[in-house]
Amino acid sequence: MSLFLSALGLMMVFEGIPYFCFPEQVKSFARKIPNTPDNILRVVGFCLMMVGLLVVYLGGGING
């Protein structure tokens, strides 16, 4: 449970960085999302999940 909470906290830190550093760009990007085709959003989401799994694997989270 401790590892999960640490990962959740770290994810929240990384998610918050763009909002803190570039709020105007985040708002501009958010306005563009409804116009983006669903298949593009799915591909981007899938790629991000795979990169995240690779980072966890290389970081020893799966084998550790």
Image: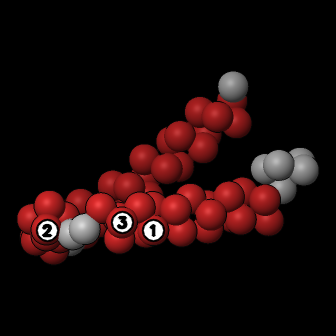
Q: Which residue is mark 2?
A: 35
Q: Which residue is mark 1?
A: 43
Identify the image quadrant of residue 53: bottom right
Q: Position of residue 30 (x, y in %)?
A: 16, 63
Please tell me how crowded label 2 is: few (under 14), some (14-19), or many (20+) other residues with Cα within 10 Å. Answer: few
Residue at 69% across, 29% down: 2
**In this rendering, does residue 63 appear at all?**
yes
Residue at 41% across, 61% down: 42
Please tell me how crowded label 3 is: few (under 14), some (14-19), or many (20+) other residues with Cα within 10 Å. Answer: few
Q: Which residue is mark 3?
A: 39
Residue at 59% across, 33% down: 5
For this view, does 26 lie left or right of residue 46? left
Q: Position of residue 40 (x, y in %)?
A: 35, 70
Q: Is residue 50 above or below residue 9?
A: below
Secondary structure at badge 3 equals helix
Mark 2 residue type: Asn
What is the quadrant of the N terminus in the image? Answer: top right
- Front-most of 47 and 61? 47
Mark 1 residue type: Val
Q: Are marks 1 and 3 in contact (CB under 8 Å)?
A: yes
Residue at 53% across, 40% down: 8
For this view, does 3 lie left or right of residue 58? left
Q: Is residue 25 above or below residue 64?
A: below
